[in-house]
Image: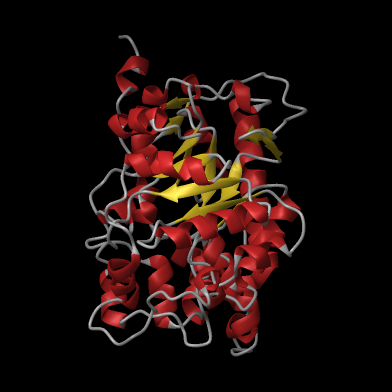
Amino acid sequence: MDLITNVCEYEAIAKQILPKMVYDYYASGAEDQWTLKENRNAFSRILFRPRILVDVSRIDLTTTVLGFKISMPIMIAPTAMQKMAHPEGEYATARAASAAGTIMTLSSWGTSSVEEVASTGPGIRFFQLYVIKNRNVVTQLVRRAEKAGFKAIALTVDTPLLGRREADIKNRFTLPSHLVLKNFEGLDLGKLDDKTNDSGLATYVASEIDRSLNWKDVKWLQTITSLPILVKGVLTAEDTKMAIEAGAAGIIVSNHGARQLDYVPATIMALEEVVKAAQGKIPVFLDGGIRRGTDVFKALALGASGVFLVYLTEAYHHHHRDVVRDTSPQVPYRSICFRLQKFCQNMNIGRPVLFSLAANGEAGVRKVLQILHDEFELAMALCGCRSLKEITRDHVVTEWDRPRIAPRL
């Protein structure tokens, strides 16, 4: 683990050690997976316009999100069923986020409950909400999150049905029998099982998620909680304006990790449209495709207030610490790491927090956050920025504005 130098490398390790059904669930996207690749590739088409001879002896990465001060504009996005990756699951993620001084978002479909995550100690945490048909359960869940000290609700709005994830269909994906969706434990709801010819999760969503969810429900949520509501899953200017009208406290530009509708734009491509439509009235955040500190810089230059990192990190240490280090004594560890690095260079996808959790538990998540912190700080220095407010649109050039810097002949 000491030789890991970028967050992508965790995926190669996780792929080796996780059961195929679990790895495929975390790694795959919808249908042709075009958007899954594009989420990553789109960042590579945005270039820097660095400024030189700036005194960068001191750099401040801190920022505030909904009034809460955090160490950097890099937060942890919600991902479901983290105990499939590592026995400590959401506990480990929560501790790592707290240690890094940033925000963790807990999924409705977590394998740890809001109360259990709160018990890990102090930290700023948001709760991601799926609205199910039983609104009494929704109300109860939101109030439990509020009572447990969570600071905001991230309302997922792009999942009236589950996207067609063909790997999950082939694998007949289901939650392993020793795990439960802890926030719904003991409630009379449908169960995730493998008695289906489809993905067990798709069947569960079809039976439980409320397809009638609409803008009126964003206002309804504000009547049952005093917590700010972030609308997660916005990709257009039109929906940005409607979110503001509905009283949203912020927007998360998200395509659900490319797991819902294929052939939607990469989130970094949709970001500027949303930012312009928001007109500074509410903060805009981004998730999807973040693998480098330079990606964070690009998102902020295009107007994001911060980014949410999808989870890549825990399984290796617990499940198979011998896979890389011990099972092949004739193969030097450094050689294996080199091969992992070559594998990563050819990957277009990744889920940094989940795979690092899989690879090395809490320490893996901590390392991912530290790597991205350090890379982002370096990008700021090399672009001549000493604080987040100094990162501007002029620091990047995109496909749609390159003509403006063409040399005059």
Colour treatment of the image = secondary structure
Asked whether 163 or 160 is in front, the reply is: 160
Q: Against 110, is 74 above or below?
A: above
Asked whether 145 or 233 is in front, the reply is: 145
Tell me the quarter of the picture where residue 86 sits: bottom right
**Residue 144 placement, left or right of 266:** right
Residue sitting at x 22%, y 61%: 32
Horizontal and vertical percent position of residue 253: 41, 41
Residue sitting at x 47%, y 28%: 303
Q: Against 260, is 265 above or below?
A: above
Q: Report whether residue 1 is seen.
A: no
Asked whether 377 or 109 is in front, the reply is: 109
Asked whether 305 or 119 is in front, the reply is: 119
Tell me the quarter of the picture where residue 240 sits: top left
Horizontal and vertical percent position of residue 131: 40, 56
Q: Report whether residue 72 is seen.
A: yes
Number of numbered tags placed on the structure image: 0
Residue sitting at x 64%, y 81%: 318
Horizontal and vertical percent position of residue 358: 57, 72
Screen quadrant of the C terminus: top left
**Residue 235 placement, left or right of 90:** left
Tell me the quarter of the picture where residue 211 sits: bottom left
Screen quadrant of the N terminus: bottom right
Q: Against 19, is 146 above or below?
A: above
